Amino acid sequence: MTQAPMIDEAPVQVDHRARMEILGAILLTIFLSALDQTIVGTALPRIVTDLSGNELYVWVVTIYLLAATVTGPIYGKLSDQFGRRPMIMFGVSLFLVGSLLAGLSQTMVQLIAFRGIQGLGAGAIFPIALAVIGDLFSPRERGKYQGLFGAVFAIASILGPALGGFLTDTISWHWVFLVNLPVGIVALAVLWRLLPPIRHPEAVRSIDYLGASVFAAALIPFLLGLTNKQSGDWADPQVGGLMLIGGLMGALFIWVESRAAEPILPLSLFRNRTVTASIVATFLITFGFFGAVIFIPRWFQFVLGSSATESGYQMLPLMAGVMGSSILSGFIVARTGRYKWLTAGAMALGTVGLFLMTGIRSDTPITTVWLWMFIAGLGIGPSFTVFTIVVQSAVAPRMLGTATSALTFFRQVGGSVGLALAGTIFGTSLANEIPRQLSAGGVPQPMIDRFASAGAAADANLTGVGVDLGQQILASVPTAVRPTVEPFIGQIVEAIHQAFSLAIANAMWLAVAGAAGAAVIVILLVPELELRQRPAATPEPAPNRPIPVPE
């Protein structure tokens, strides 16, 4: 088999100044998405408390990820066919509409629905932004410039928690969504002025509407069933039934894609070992990491009594580790052209950090938790940069948008599945641990039986933030028995805090398994390729190379 010719050029040729201006526009768009994530994370415990939606805690994030997951591959394909600029501008505009509506929400159901609209728009931002970098920079350059994405996330990680906490504590949590509007309007203006209408004139004008519909019909019921497991059994129609429907529709999706002229997720991508291994590793690391750490801000606010602002800054060790190692790994890959053992070592370090976090308890010193978070972040960070470089270097230029979207798709699927599973583990563990910890604290058995009989909904109501838990418990019991309960309030509160901490620790084991699995995949299946040059998939004549063309 003849080796493909080697090139060391960007697929799209523009002058250096134009490339830097476009890079700035893309980084501003990424900042919009990153800022929304960091603001909402610290405000979420207060939001679900105010809207009486503790039992729907994970839905605020799950629906966003689900919508972004469904639309990501579609946006990637459409951007290949019709151009990067119109598709990313449409996505940002839809994201802003969802932000406005989410900021006006008055009920938990409204907030979840409008977060879904946000996700429909957000699905365009990251895959198209990465595809633009793939268009404009050579493989060796991509590591350096994609590392700047980590810098943007680092800035958002510092600014977001402070801004989100300030708005939540001093004005209203509604403004954590409304603040997206001015940033988004600026991003739209800059994109319109600077981003060229890059597209591939050789692409066939065919959109896989059937595949997109079947894809949504497969993913949505599967994730809904997985999430419903928190309050049901596997045999329930709302759990096992929905997951079965999702599995059947998933098989149908594979069949449809194998026959589509222009599939939204080309199955041919998975014939490439590098692409397949990178996607599986990305799925596993996100599967564990995202699903577990979403609960850490709640631990700070519920167990330690931190404000939204304080909990945001208490997350900085994790974010500093993630963003610092993401940026550094990008520059290392750009300089050396090597990535395998860097990534394998990072995954192993992430496994160690997440394992340490399974030891979290109500009396764990906060400085110890910060150290564990920083170690975990150092290990996780490179996965957000290196796998993108590897996948983009393994496919032809005309497949950049589709391949990047596939990687983003599996990253979001991993987050969605991991979040649903972590929520189930957390809820089940909390219900089981509360009676055990009450008994260990010396609380009388009749009181323990009352907590046990109240069910998961009552447990969720006990974990709201910004309230005095002891007074909340006293207010929930009949006046006649309050004198009997009051002497044990201290033990009850401490037992609930310990049960909450143990539930989070159990959810962290999911993250450990995901990180360890990613490390094994990288070591065994991801090949070490030197990225000094890039093999073209086929030796095409120069006129057939993708170029910017007017629309």
Image (cartoon, rainbow, N blue to C red):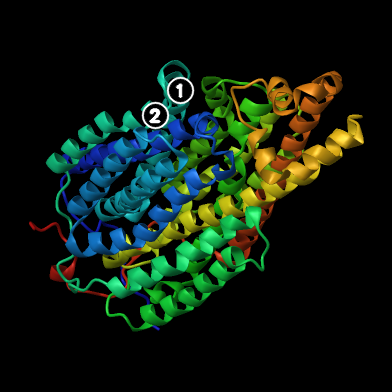
Q: Which residue in the rendered view is the most extreme toward the left?
A: 550
Give the image quarter of residue 371.
Answer: top right
Residue positioned 10% across, 58% down in the render: 549
Q: Which mark is residue 176?
A: 2
- Mark 2 is surrounded, within 10 Å at the Cα level, by few (under 14), some (14 to 19) or many (20 or more) other residues, namely many
Q: Which mark is residue 239?
A: none
User: Does residue 470 lie above or below 522 as drawn?
Assistant: above
User: Does residue 337 lie above or below 158 as drawn?
Assistant: below
Dot 2: what SS?
helix
On-image quarter of the C terminus: bottom left
Which residue position holds label 1? Answer: 168
Q: Position of residue 207 (x, y in %)?
A: 24, 71
Q: Position of residue 514 (x, y in %)?
A: 63, 55
The amino acid type of the residue labelled 1 equals Thr
Q: Which residue in the rendered view is the most extreme toward the front?
A: 480
Report, in whole angstroms, how far the alpha carbon at label 1 lies from the one at label 2. Answer: 7 Å
The amino acid type of the residue labelled 2 equals Val
Say whether disc 1 or disc 2 marks the residue closer to the N-terminus.
1
Of the pair 309 and 390, the residue shown nearer to us? 309
Residue positioned 77% across, 26% down in the render: 493
Is residue 7 at least partly visible in the picture? no
Q: Are circles 1 and 2 on residues that touch, CB within 8 Å?
A: yes
Q: How many marks?
A: 2
